Image: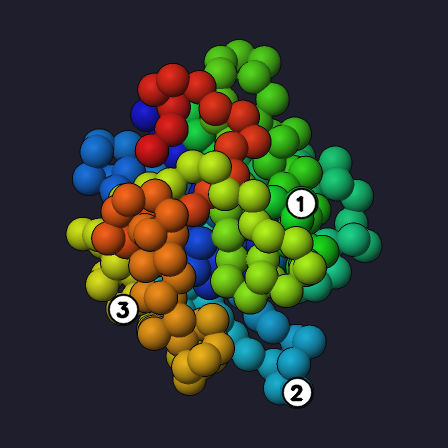
Amino acid sequence: MEALILVSHADDETLAAGGTIQKLLKRGWEVNVLILSGGMLGTRSTVQDNRPGAMAACKLLGAGEPKLLGFPDQKFDTIATADLANAVFGLGYQPDLIITHTETDLNLDHKITSQVAKIVGRPKKKPVSILGCEVPNTSFWNGQAFPANFYVDITGEIDTKIKAFALYENELQPYPHPWSEKGLRLLAEYHGMQSGFPYAEAFSIIRGYEGRLP
């Protein structure tokens, strides 16, 4: 089985699905991490390079080297959605599961990536499950709750997830920021409380098929 983690920015994959990536790999899935942007953040006071963090975090999670497509950060709305989707199609992935963003997210790049995932995941040749993921802060701050209806037990994976995110030196923040080590653990505890696990990641089922979910 093949999973495609299709996200906008370097760090989204670890923040939203760092535990689930490990879980899928342990179950024998092939996991590919695809980041639409180039890993360079030019919208802050200084240009920040998150590519080393992406390489190190994905390696620690066990997913290998992520693929970065190089589209400009926070400017996906200046590119035709069809061009974004065709860039993904051109890589030849054949996923049974896509993990991506949701349209309830505050970040516009995330919303557009969700649309790209729905195009890429059309079940023309086989069923493709699509899960929307939660990125702490941009999912929190849009005035509406993340529509969680699917949970993955990451009790055995939470420590490695946090260690992986800490490799993003530009992104790790002090508590109470959601991108702090304590913040990530508290969020996993909260979803665990919702779902009956000690620690969990939450997702929203955009489309689900038996045998094609984590």
- Assign a secondary structure to mark 3: helix
* Residue at x 75% of width, y 41% of height: 81
Residue 134 visible? The answer is yes
Q: CA distance from mark 2 to mark 1?
A: 28 Å
Q: Is residue 148 left or right of residue 201?
A: right
Where does label 1 land, which residue?
103
Specify the label residue 45 is tagged with: 2
Residue 146 x, y percent position in the rendering: 56, 50
Please identify the residue farthest to the bottom as the structure is shown: 45
Which residue type carries mark 2? Ser
Q: Quadrant of the N terminus?
A: top left
- Residue 142 figure quarter: bottom right
Which residue type carries mark 3? Lys
Say whether disc 2 or disc 3 marks the residue closer to the N-terminus.
Answer: 2
Tell me, yes or no, whether the two marked residues, 3 and 1, touch with CB atoms within 8 Å.
no
Say whether disc 3 or disc 1 marks the residue closer to the N-terminus.
Answer: 1
Where does label 3 land, which residue?
163
